[in-house]
């Protein structure tokens, strides 16, 4: 309970607000300018990716940022629409409504609210540990596959052809069918914008610095490249009437601040979106908390995962009530915020003000913005997420991790994002259970002249034929309880001269009720054949728990503090006790 | 691969058939007679419980027994319809067809075939370990709740009223609504049969032995009580025209051997039954393998879980092609078979012949059998499964196990059997992950005058302010990788004088790729603050794996064989190395 009150007492703005000064204000303001410039084209593009009208992306970049700034624990996390969550949103609302429809917008609000409530619940109940279900390799694989899928899905906007599909093969087939109708003007805009953006990421800053610009200004200009691409292509579209030549434009975007929206409470809709919301919640949280943790560690700051859940929860609830869609902390954007010197979450509030001003004054400029430009923005951004090195890395280190990663990548690409991430989580759990269900168990013997006992297969050791010393290198729980029974019965049946079995437990960190019942079975069954069961080096917490049951009273043998003591006493015969 | 060939070479009948003699034949035959007598009313009753016509139960007790006898590894397991699987069958086919309909029979065939194929696949792929998902406490809770649900569902037959529902509250409400229509004749038959059966289980054998009967004969007579109940109530129904008085009778049952049935291959039906089939497969296998293992251990025999999967798979495939429904090894029946002296699976084949003869010659006798008698048989049988001691036992030993058990029981009773077992499995996994995601981590110090290092909170130990010794009592994997980062960063930030962190790893049985990446992050981040990371007492297999990555090359400190060595060297200053 102490911790829960502490959570309230440590309301983040109380901490950073107290020491807020002019320096922090300057740094936060300049970081906010850079992030705003970066966020405008991104929020339009990711809304398109999610199958939503462009203004939804802008709305998702206003109040949610304020929500996070008030409740989040990271000082530099930049919240808003991100690529992977937008893709997952598209998959989720695609199941209940056609892309771009009013129903899709309504579903996006519900999805944001649901995800927000889930995040808040996890935060308040301190269940942040559930994010641990997603292993590093699985999330890496998922992000790589999502990046490919997102890029493939945007090619239609670059070619100016219709195409559909949620999997790589569907998208490919659809693109190939329609590639004949490619609009050359759209293609020119799209490829031009993509090439410009790619180059500005790689070479622009260095070029500017070489021409004598200050480092910071060069960086700002390079970061503004997407805005420049938006401006130049919009201007071209206006000047050359590209819309009449078949180039699809963003068109009319409503002007003004986000509307107050109330997500519909339709139990059927909530139920059908609940599983998707749960996946978005977990993926969004894991992505966000990793970024926040990495950046915090660089400045020797700490983040609080449960507080992060509350912050992201507030952001998504805000999205649900202000015409947005699910948001989370973005990697690239947070790094930019960090590099630009943001010191406190106030930078997020200033960014929200910036985007708010954009919705008030800049939306008419979007009338001529080619969709191909937004597609180019997305493609260049997501391709930086694609990283296949996790495959070779996991192949070398552990085939089990490799299996989980490749299943995640293949299922995401060829079946769907939700199946993909679920398969990854499911398979990593299954593999873990499999591994622990057949734990490493060694028969050990004494290293001559010492009190050490080592694996008889690896070392030259001394054993006594009437004593079987078995070391189990795993906690005993339901997944391996049966294994232990089988292993010991088999071993004893192959060694008829054995009179004592000693389970050496220095690596047994827990014994659950299933395992306790197995130990009771082992004890009883061995006693029936005249073999006594002993235990040695049982850890304190494990012993405390065993004492809550009557297992120790019924144990045919004894529990010894050290294995050496056990062997000495049993050899001397003093350890022999009749089975009870 | 060696093992897979061995599986073929060790075809069970080759083993027991070779040594089959007259003694075995006599024992197997007499056991088969007793099991047949027990199985006839049971198979009729369980078919009724599954919402299927009575002959389906008989058919499920013929070829499936032969299938298991040819491929199973247990010498005494008695396969056939069992209560819990019948209840799960009712729940599964209730979703696709009304009880008793032709579609229900067809669905039961598909369910048996699907479950059979799943069992075979698991057996051939040697995936029997998946049964480990079901912890002992969860299966105990599930069986107890199923027993209550089954008994409640049979009360309508005892009262002679219509009632429906799949959950305890639905059944209760439905019974209360219709209790006014209770048929007194049905009630008399039902209560009379139940009382007789209950008494015969408790006191009959003792009474018979006391009157001077030989033990074995007394046992046989006591075991025949259900047959006597069937005979007496049928005779009464015929003599007093109970059918005209409103007592529901079994009626016409087709005479003859099981038909050859081919389960329909309807992809939609297969898909909608697949999840249910998977649950039936797991529950059936776990129940069966536990019985088989317990009985085998009593005679110092071994069973092979993968061979068991093949045997049960063959039994269920046979059920699908011979008009049956899902079967598995029954607890009570196998114990009877064992006690009656069955020596080999041939006893199962003789039982199948016995049931076959019954379908040929005895079905006309079922014309007057009251359904209330069958309901009484079921109630008396399943109430012996109900055992709430698991609740108190788990409460004392571990609240986590208690939570899993109570969730299983409550969900089974009040939501449904499939949700119930799934909730149990899900929750026990979740609890396990939760526990391992926050492992026991201790800061350790030297016990003065020894080379032992113990928890600073539990023991009076000596520590050096510049060296932090941390012992992790758990394998490092994705669920706790982030925890370790947080723990260490927090500890180091609170101890600014620390220069060396030594991770003591005697209880770390594995390090997966997620944990490796966390260790790399820890190493890098600590190095940036001038703190060196070392490891000690890393186990052989863990070290072998670490060497597959470049982690050890990049480690800022060293890996020491013993923790004492590490502390000595670092104190002397010789262990200090610049961060690489």
Image: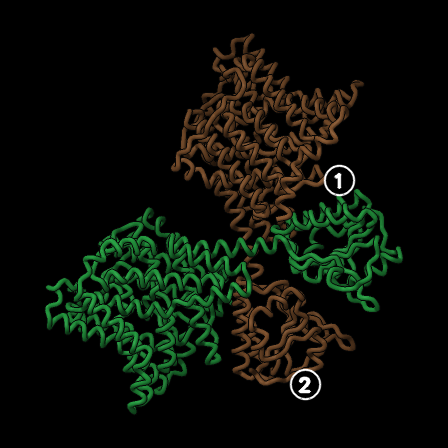
Chain colours: A green, B brown
Observer able to see residue B462: yes
Choose top left, top right, bottom left or bottom right for residue B327. Answer: top right
Q: Is residue A215 above or below residue B217?
A: below
Q: Looking at the picture, how far across and down is residue B548, in whole percent?
A: 58, 68
- In-front residue for pair B547/B452: B547
Whether marks 2 and 1 lie on the same chain: yes
Residue tagged 1: B300
Q: Residues within 10 Å of mark 1 (few under 14, many from 20)?
A: few
**Furthest-top residue in view?**
B239
The numbered mark 1 sits on a residue in which chain?
A: B
Q: Residues within 10 Å of mark 2 (few under 14, many from 20)?
A: few
Q: Is residue B248 above or below residue A171?
A: above
Local secondary structure at mark 1? loop
Total labels: the figure holds 2
Q: Is residue B565 above or below residue B114?
A: below
Q: Residue at x 67, y 40 (%)?
A: B303
Mark 2–mark 1 Cα distance, whole angstroms, equals 58 Å
Q: Residue at x 42, y 59 (%)?
A: A409
Residue tagged 2: B574
Q: Looking at the picture, how far across and down is residue B472, in whole percent?
A: 63, 68
């Amino acid at each position: 309970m102490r911790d829960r009150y502490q959570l309230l007492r440590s309301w983040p703005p109380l901490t950073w607000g107290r020491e807020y000064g002019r320096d922090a204000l300057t740094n936060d303001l300049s970081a906010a300018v850079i992030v705003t410039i970066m966020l405008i084209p991104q929020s339009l593009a990711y809304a398109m990716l999610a199958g939503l009208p462009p203004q939804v992306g802008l709305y998702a970049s206003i109040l949610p940022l304020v929500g996070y700034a008030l409740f989040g624990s990271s000082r530099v996390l930049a919240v808003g629409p991100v690529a992977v969550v937008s893709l997952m949103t598209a998959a989720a609302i695609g199941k209940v409504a056609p892309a771009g429809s009013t129903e899709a917008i309504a579903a996006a609000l519900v999805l944001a609210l649901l995800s927000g409530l889930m995040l808040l619940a996890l935060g308040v109940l301190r269940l942040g540990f559930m994010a641990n279900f997603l292993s590093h390799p699985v999330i890496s694989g998922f992000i790589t596959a999502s990046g490919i899928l997102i890029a493939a899905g945007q090619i239609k906007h670059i070619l100016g052809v219709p195409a559909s599909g949620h999997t790589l093969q569907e998208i490919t087939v659809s693109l190939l069918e329609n590639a004949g109708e490619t609009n050359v003007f759209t293609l020119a805009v799209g490829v031009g914008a993509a090439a410009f953006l790619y180059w500005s990421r790689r070479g622009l800053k260095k070029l500017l610095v070489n021409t004598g610009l200050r480092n910071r200004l060069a960086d700002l200009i390079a970061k503004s490249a997407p805005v420049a691409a938006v401006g130049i292509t919009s201007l071209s579209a206006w000047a050359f009437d590209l819309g009449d030549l078949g180039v699809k434009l963003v068109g009319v975007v409503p002007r003004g601040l986000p509307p107050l929206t109330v997500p519909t409470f339709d139990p059927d809709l909530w139920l059908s979106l609940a599983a998707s919301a749960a996946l978005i919640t977990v993926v969004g949280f894991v992505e966000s908390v990793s970024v926040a943790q990495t950046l915090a560690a660089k400045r020797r700051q700490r983040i609080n995962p449960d507080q992060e859940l509350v912050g992201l929860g507030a952001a998504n609830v805000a999205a649900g009530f202000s015409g947005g869609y699910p948001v989370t902390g973005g990697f690239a954007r947070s790094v930019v915020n960090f590099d630009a010197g943001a010191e406190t979450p106030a930078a997020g509030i200033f960014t929200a003000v910036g985007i708010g001003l954009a919705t008030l004054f800049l939306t008419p400029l979007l009338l001529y913005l080619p969709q191909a430009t937004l597609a180019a923005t997305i493609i260049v951004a997501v391709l930086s997420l694609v990283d296949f090195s996790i495959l070779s890395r996991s192949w070398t280190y552990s085939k089990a991790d490799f299996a989980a990663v490749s299943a995640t990548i293949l299922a995401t690409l060829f079946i769907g994002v939700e199946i993909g991430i679920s398969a990854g989580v499911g398979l990593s759990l299954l593999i873990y259970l499999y591994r622990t269900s057949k734990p490493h168990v060694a028969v050990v013997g004494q290293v001559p002249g010492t009190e050490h006992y080592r694996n008889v297969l690896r070392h030259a050791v001394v054993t006594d034929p009437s004593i079987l010393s078995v070391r189990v290198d795993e906690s005993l729980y339901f997944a391996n309880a049966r294994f232990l029974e089988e292993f010991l019965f088999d071993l004893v049946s192959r060694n008829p001269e054995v009179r004592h079995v000693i389970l050496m437990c220095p690596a047994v960190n827990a014994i659950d009720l299933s395992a306790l019942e197995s130990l009771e079975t082992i004890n009883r069954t061995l006693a029936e054949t005249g073999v006594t069961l002993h235990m040695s080096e049982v850890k304190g917490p494990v012993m405390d728990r065993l004492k809550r049951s009557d297992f120790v009273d019924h144990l045919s043998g004894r529990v010894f503090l050290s294995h050496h003591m056990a062997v000495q006493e049993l050899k001397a015969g003093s350890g022999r006790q009749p089975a009870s």
